[in-house]
Amino acid sequence: MTATSLGYEEVAEFIASLDPAKLLDLRPSTAVQERVEYLIEKKKDSGLTADEQYELDRYLALEHLIALAKVRARIRLNAA
């Protein structure tokens, strides 16, 4: 396991411990969903600028972190 993935794991565990039920209800806003979809489509069609690729990478990293936290939240709620 890399230091980065360990960092994600630790942050995900912390987020999940705050309020597991609320975390499971967390969804991105319509604006965020539309922006990510736009960036993904643009990447497929014509490519992204460096700034756009950085933005998409950040969205994807955040999505990964929240997914990890949600798994931990489900585990916490099932154990309760």
Image: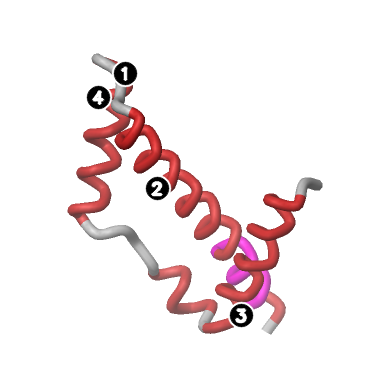
Point 77% across, 46% down: residue: 2
Instruction: Identify the secondary structure beneath mark 3.
Output: helix
Q: Amino acid at mark 3?
A: Ser
Q: CA distance from mark 2 to mark 3?
A: 22 Å
Q: CA distance from mark 2 to mark 1?
A: 17 Å
Q: Where residue 51 sits in the image (x, y, percent)? A: 32, 36
Instruction: Identify the secondary structure beneath mark 1.
Output: helix
Disc ID at residue 17: 3
Closer to the camera in the image, 13 or 26: 13
Q: Amino acid at mark 4?
A: Lys
Q: Earlier in the sequence, mark 1 or mark 3?
A: 3
Q: Earlier in the sequence, mark 4 or mark 2?
A: 4
Point 46% across, 51% down: residue: 63
Q: Which residue is mark 4?
A: 42
Magenta region, residue range: 70-77
Q: Give the quadrant of the C terminus.
A: bottom right
Q: CA distance from mark 4 to mark 2?
A: 15 Å
Q: Looking at the picture, does residue 77 appear above or below residue 60?
A: below
Instruction: Identify the secondary structure beneath mark 2.
Output: helix
Q: CA distance from mark 4 to mark 1?
A: 5 Å
Find out whether the residues at labels 4 and 1 contact each other: C-beta distance under 8 Å. Answer: yes
Graded by Cα atoms within 10 Å as few (under 14), some (14 to 19) or many (20 or more), the crowding at tag 4 reads: some
Disc ID at residue 26: none
Mark count: 4
Instruction: Identify the secondary structure beneath mark 4.
Output: helix
Graded by Cα atoms within 10 Å as few (under 14), some (14 to 19) or many (20 or more), the crowding at tag 2 reads: some
Point 61% across, 65% down: residue: 12
Closer to the camera in the image, 52 or 74: 52
Query: Is residue 10 left or right of 31 when viewed as pictured?
Result: right
